[in-house]
């Protein structure tokens, strides 16, 4: 029986019913501008600040350390460019990052590199995990910032954030993490983990697209992003997106309410999918099998094109991804898979399945019913596969 299975939650998630219900009144009867002095405005202001407090609490931060943005990309750009230009004025023009960051980080540091900054891209090895000692060894006199993602969006690997944060703290260097994939899936405490700045995004955790936040530790001098009114304490002007901010707060409540139970269920589903797909010959799991997001599956199937696989899966009602959504449409293999050492021809045949709490065991059954047949079918038509089999290496 054909089903519809949405399994691309690392790209985006549907807004949950609870979240949608919580946000709707802020478009109609509670539409006040938080900066206005009459009661509908004051009410909106109160709700806004309660949401900020709640979001801060979920991260172990203080309310005045949370700044709302339009999403993860804006938060990453603000943190990295802001600190680079601020500290660059004092001659600190070196940035440390990893080879497999999201493009919101990679393209930002690449732009800085064109503007006189020097960037060190750390290796992520075969398991897709940065080594803390590599961070320490890369630190120089003129290092301004270390930016390493919390969990990778393609292969789901979770980075040793506390160790990296502690090294940065000991060296007096600022540490930013793109935690867009981690927030809502992993418990985070910015103080315990020595994180100075953290980016998050609503639409990866059942809140709408177009809302995110940047945590900035008190004492970090991040320049203002948008000039205008006094919103976000003058750092990012513009009338606040109250409905979406409420949504983000409620989405975090939902995500963290039964996290351990949900993650245990997701890990069971993920591991059953990995085990089932591993029976397909010449397949391999990408990234560490244990230190990965509960809902993340990423495997390569030799001799096929990821794009054809996705089209066939789509025809069967399954939404997955190959590489990251931002690069699909290009024929370049994923920079993440190249960073963990996969050769180009294998990196092309990758499939990412990412589950959320809305997926079920039946979804896993259905994927396992459909996937092996599609892989065989594509291999039958593939000259690449004939070549692989004739060499039989
Ligand atoms: C989705 C994503 C982003 C971008 O967030 P937007 O809210 O879509 O701008 C940044 N980093 C990672 C790791 C992501 O997965």
Image (cartoon, rainbow, N blue to C red):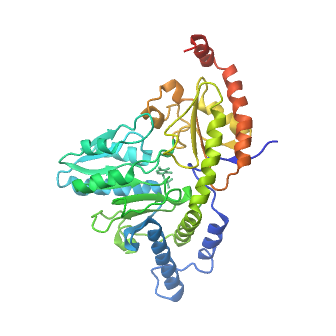
Give the left or right position of residue 105, taking residue 25 as reference.
Answer: left
The residue located at (27%, 67%) in the rendering is: 219
Q: Please state which of residues 269 and 37 is positioned toward the viewer in this rendering.
A: 269
On screen, 4 above or below 74?
Answer: above
Point out the image quarter for the N terminus: top right
Which x, y percent locates residue 135?
30, 44
On screen, 340 above or below 235?
Answer: above
The residue located at (70%, 51%) in the rendering is: 360
Give the left or right position of residue 308, taking residue 286 as reference.
Answer: right
Q: Please state which of residues 142 and 242 is positioned toward the viewer in this rendering.
A: 142
Image quadrant where residue 321 sits: top right
Give the left or right position of residue 371, taking residue 181 as reference.
Answer: right
Q: Please state which of residues 120 and 78 is positioned toward the viewer in this rendering.
A: 120
Image quadrant where residue 310 sits: top right
Q: Please state which of residues 151 and 3 is positioned toward the viewer in this rendering.
A: 151
The residue located at (61%, 59%) in the rendering is: 261
Which x, y percent locates residue 143?
23, 49
On screen, 209 above or below 52?
Answer: above
Can see residue 352? yes
Can see residue 317? no
Which x, y percent locates residue 78?
36, 57
The residue located at (46%, 58%) in the rendering is: 200
Q: Extreme right residue here?
A: 1
Which x, y percent locates residue 68?
44, 66
């Amino acid at each position: 029986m054909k089903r519809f299975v949405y399994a691309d939650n690392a790209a985006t998630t549907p807004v949950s019913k609870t979240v949608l219900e919580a946000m709707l009144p802020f478009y109609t009867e509670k539409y006040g501008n938080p900066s206005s002095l009459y009661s509908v405005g004051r009410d909106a202001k109160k709700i806004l600040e309660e949401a900020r407090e709640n979001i801060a609490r979920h991260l172990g931060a203080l309310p005045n350390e949370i700044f709302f943005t339009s999403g993860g990309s804006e938060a990453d750009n603000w943190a990295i460019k802001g600190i680079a230009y601020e500290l660059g004025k004092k001659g600190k023009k070196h940035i440390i990052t990893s080879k497999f960051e999201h493009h919101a980080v990679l393209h930002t540091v690449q732009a800085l590199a064109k503007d006189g900054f020097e960037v060190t891209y750390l290796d992520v090895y075969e398991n897709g995990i940065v080594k803390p000692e590599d961070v320490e060894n890369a630190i120089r006199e003129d290092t301004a910032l270390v930016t390493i993602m919390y969990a990778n969006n393609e292969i789901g690997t979770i980075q040793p954030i506390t160790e990296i944060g502690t090294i940065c703290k000991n060296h007096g260097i600022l540490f930013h993490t793109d935690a867009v994939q981690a927030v809502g899936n992993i418990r985070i405490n910015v103080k315990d983990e020595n994180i100075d700045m953290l980016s998050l995004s609503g639409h990866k955790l059942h809140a709408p697209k177009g809302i995110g936040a940047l945590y900035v530790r008190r004492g970090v001098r991040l320049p203002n992003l948008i000039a205008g009114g006094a919103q976000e304490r003058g750092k990012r002007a513009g009338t606040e997106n109250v409905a979406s901010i409420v949504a983000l707060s409620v989405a975090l409540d939902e995500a963290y309410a039964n996290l351990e139970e949900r993650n245990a269920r997701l890990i069971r589903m993920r591991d059953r999918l990995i085990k089932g797909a591993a029976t397909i010959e010449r397949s391999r799991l990408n990234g560490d099998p244990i230190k990965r997001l509960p809902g993340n599956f990423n495997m390569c199937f030799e001799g096929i094109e990821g794009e054809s696989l996705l089209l066939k899966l789509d025809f069967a009602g399954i939404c997955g991804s190959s590489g990251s959504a931002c690069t699909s449409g290009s024929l370049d293999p994923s920079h993440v898979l190249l960073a963990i050492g996969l050769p180009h021809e294998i990196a092309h045949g990758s499939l990412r399945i990412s589950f959320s709490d809305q997926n079920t065991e039946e979804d896993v059954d259905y994927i396992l019913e459909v996937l092996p047949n599609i892989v065989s079918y594509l291999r039958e038509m593939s000259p690449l596969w004939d070549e692989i089999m004739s060499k039989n290496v």
